Amino acid sequence: MLFAVPDRVRDVRDAVHAFMTERVEPAEDVLNAGGDAARETIAGLQREAKDAGLWALGHPAELGGGGLPFLDYVYVNEVQGRSEWGQIALGTFTLQDSLMLHKYASPRWRDRYLAPMVAGELSPSFAMTEPAVAGSDPTGMETTAELDGDHWVVRGRKWFTTNAAAAAYTTVMCRTEPDAESPHRAFSMIIVPTDTPGYRIVRDTPVLGLGGGTGHGGHYEVAYEDVRVPADNLLGPRGHGFVIAQDRLGPGRIFHCMRWLGQAQRAFELMCARLDSRVAFGEPLAAKQLMQQHVFDSYTEIQAARMLTLQAAEQIDAGSQARVEIGAIKVVGAKMLHNVIDRAIQVHGAAGLTDDFPLSRMYRHAREARIYDGPDEVHVQSTARRILKAMR
């Protein structure tokens, strides 16, 4: 494993880094405020990314993307993650969904959605979590789909369906095989266009005070009230919902962890700059030993998380499910992100709590990371069990 950025990807990574620091990060105040100005700004950034050859770098070339190999894109994804708006500005917000659609959808839906999705002309959304069911045990999901002639009828309620208000469709995980021997074979994924009768957005759920901004993002609660969609809206075979989910979530967690590294690196840079520029008791904060401890701890945690993430990425690229490696980085990466941003806020003092710096918003998003895609406790337990089993 190469810890350094490979030469073959350095130029494009540097170009993405420059785009993020010079174009995206300065626009964050406008983007976070939402409204017409935000929509115009993100559209302008997307045009610039396309003109610069930086658009949709992780998408396969045959789908209209940049065609970067998985491991190369992992390095790019880190610097893209410096801002929550990086994925949208650079056209990679849809990557997991386009890969899933390309592999499992019927030809009709691939023809309808794939090219516009990669071009940034439409957005997807994904529905799994439910308000009345513990997300740590997804086999308890209650949303159902029954085949009625040549249509599925979907009934239930989901929440934390990110981007539902702006999406062209939602991929819904629902129970289709109530008599399955294994609970993991009882669920399927079904494409539901958001303009289908019975698809009703209940609310944009506020998350630690953060809303949907420009219409991108937002975590919506959606009711499925006898929603009827054609039978070929099924993704893959019946009862293979968890198989497809694992196929989606493995690389997705790598992408999460690399973006977390980008966020942590940005917070680390802000912290170090503050330590050098702020004077207390006659000398820069950087001269204080307790402040130096913050630098040391943050540096080592970032480097350790980066190594673990790259190791997991290599395993995925080699064809392994890498469940131990991915379980480890999901917990370690989320904790690292929280810790580094927390220290950066501490170094900034009262200013770190304000919107004068991006740290307050970053901190709230960092807290989400310990819950979504599985809470820490589930990953700790499942990873430890696999390690113990391998050691026997």
Image (cartoon, rainbow, N blue to C red):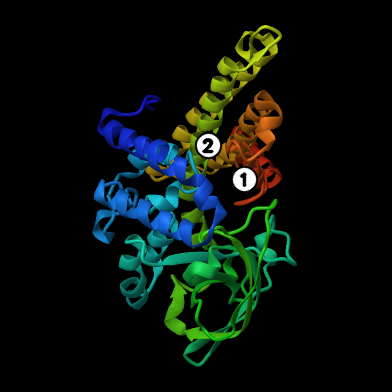
Of residues 238 and 338, the one drawn nearer to the viewer in this rendering: 338
276 lies left or right of 364: left
Whole-percent x and y of residue 260? Answer: 53, 39
| Residue at x 62% of width, y 57% of height | 211
Whole-percent x and y of residue 161? Answer: 59, 64
The kind of secondary structure element at disc 2 is helix
In the rendered image, the vertical position of residue 23 relative to residue 109, given as above or below = above
Of residues 119 and 270, the one drawn nearer to the viewer in this rendering: 270
- Please state which amino acid type lies under the numbered disc 2: Gln
303 lies left or right of 180: left
Q: What crowding class fits label 1: few (fewer than 14 Cα within 10 Å), some (14-19), or many (20 or more)?
A: some
Q: What crowding class fits label 2: few (fewer than 14 Cα within 10 Å), some (14-19), or many (20 or more)?
A: many
Can residue 321 be seen in this snapshot? Answer: no
Dots 1, 2 in contact, CB < 8 A: yes
Pointer 1: what residue? 365
Q: CA distance from mark 1 to mark 2?
A: 10 Å
The residue furthest bottom is: 149
Can residue 388 be seen in this snapshot? Answer: yes
Of residues 105 and 72, the one drawn nearer to the viewer in this rendering: 72
Locate the C terminus and report the quarter of the image it occupies. Answer: top right
Of residues 250 and 391, the one drawn nearer to the viewer in this rendering: 250
Pointer 2: what residue? 263
- Please state which amino acid type lies under the numbered disc 1: His
Residue 304, numbered label: none
| Residue at x 54% of width, y 57% of height | 34
